[in-house]
Amino acid sequence: MNLDASPAIPCDTLVTASGILTQNARREVIRDGAVAISGGRIAAVGSRAELATAYAPAETLAMGQALVLPGLVNAHAHAAMTLFRGLADDLPIADWLHNHIWPVERLLTPEAVHLGALAACAEMLACGTTCFADLYFFADQTARAADTLGMRAVVGEGVLDFPTPSAKTPAEALDISRALFDHLRSHPRLSAMVVAHSPYAASDATLAACAALAREQDAVFTLHAAEGVTENADSLKKTGKRVIPHLHSLGILGKNCLLAHCVHVDDTDLDLLAATGTNVAHCPRSNAKLASGTAPIPAMLQRGLAVALGTDGAASNNALNLFAEMGFASLGHKLASGDPTSFPARAALDAATLGGAACLGLPDIGAIVPGHHADLAVLSLTRPSMVPFFDAPSQLVYAASGAEVVLTMVAGRVVYRDGRFPNLDAAALFREVRDMAASLAAKRP
């Protein structure tokens, strides 16, 4: 009997699998590994043999031939737009937005946003996304949906210079934003951010007020920028500056600023983004579907910008699947540049995990390392697309579809497993969503 042996350390859960993709500083993959979880955070990561001896778990999740990876981070979404999936497709962005999306959005209600956001959360969890940033109306309802399904989310109330479904004026939308900060301040998984739609839908005064609120709250300020092909020309005509320099002149760029898209940016714009430490949410499938163009992400990474991946809304994508975004991003940049090394699988995987964490100011997600939140996704390696399995980043980016996800965990709690959600009757929800979507479509102008 070994009297010197240390007693096993109690923990809540031990997850074991044939592989652990840590996304730590060394980008280490641990074969036949395990993750010990206690109090919703990662206590240890290592070999199965070591952790099975060192820890005494209340529960063991033996995943077998599977890969455990950090939960994916969707840095730009409009969750409730699941209600408009397929409603207006194959259109130029200006026509799509002004003549189809904005008119039907005016019909939204808190109930509609809640239902649409619930469906979005279920969709994201089923393909390994554990955290998302959401920009929309009735943002409290999106927060409510994320809370119900146990997700992590950063939500913001859209501020525009014309009436929205939830606010008649920009000042009212900012008041809603302040209330959202107060409501979510102590929540363990949810937080608030400041949202302006874009420089073309918010005046300089509105943008400055949003930036001031973000500084006051020490929060992320996010908006769409340089997405459409005419935005720079329109901005030059209106302000005498391109979009990015104009935003800089208003004091908006900086480490707490997250710009979505940034498709039409030149070298001077990129240098300004890098100098100010501004972050970028890359939404490649949405940009492709609306024929907006290809954002120069490799050039951004060369300048040291933090880049995350986002899906945008289900009306312009039409899926909320970060596996699809990773694959499309990597292949799209190779095609656009003619350089197969321009945006490799590793860079795409980093953008969907560590990049999202950095851009949202959440330093303790995006990697499986001690002290981080236990936000995990587990992919089966027995699916045909995962056999054989040589290199984790390339397999995840070029072969996985997201359908291989068999379990998703947030803060140490299983929130999705094998098609089921602990707090959700998915079939009943989807019936309600179909009815709501049909009702809104029938009422649109």
Image: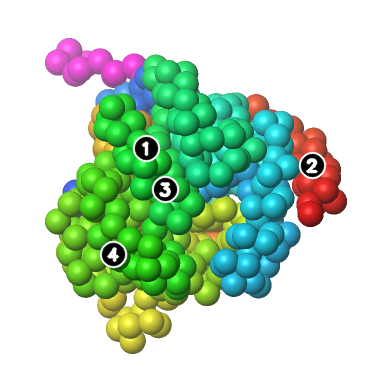
Mark 3: which secondary structure? loop
**Mark 1 and mark 3 residues within 8 Å of each other at the beta carbon:** no
- Which residue is denoted by mark 4 in the rendering? 241
Of callouts 1 and 4, the N-terminal one: 1
**Mark 2 and mark 3 residues within 8 Å of each other at the beta carbon:** no
Visible residue check, residue 64: no
- Which residue is found at the position 65% from the left and 55% from the top? 101
Q: Badge 2: how crowded within 10 Å, few (<14), some, or many (20+)? A: some
Mark 4: which secondary structure? loop
**Residue 432 vs residue 258, the one in the foreground:** 258
Of callouts 2 and 1, the N-terminal one: 1
- Which residue is found at the position 29% from the left and 65% from the top? 240
**Residue 436 vs residue 165, the one in the foreground:** 165
Image spot of residue 391 (x, y percent) = 35, 65
Image spot of residue 189 (x, y percent) = 43, 27
Any magenta on residue 14?
yes
Of callouts 4 and 3, the N-terminal one: 3
Task: Residue type at mark 1: give it.
Answer: Cys
Left or right: where 51 falls relative to 75:
left
- Which residue is denoted by mark 3 in the rendering? 203
* 3D distance between C-alphas at marks 2 and 4: 42 Å
**Residue 9 vs residue 195, the one in the foreground:** 195
* 3D distance between C-alphas at marks 4 and 3: 15 Å
- Which residue is denoted by mark 1 in the rendering? 210
Report the disc number at residue 436: 2
Span colored in magenta: 1-15
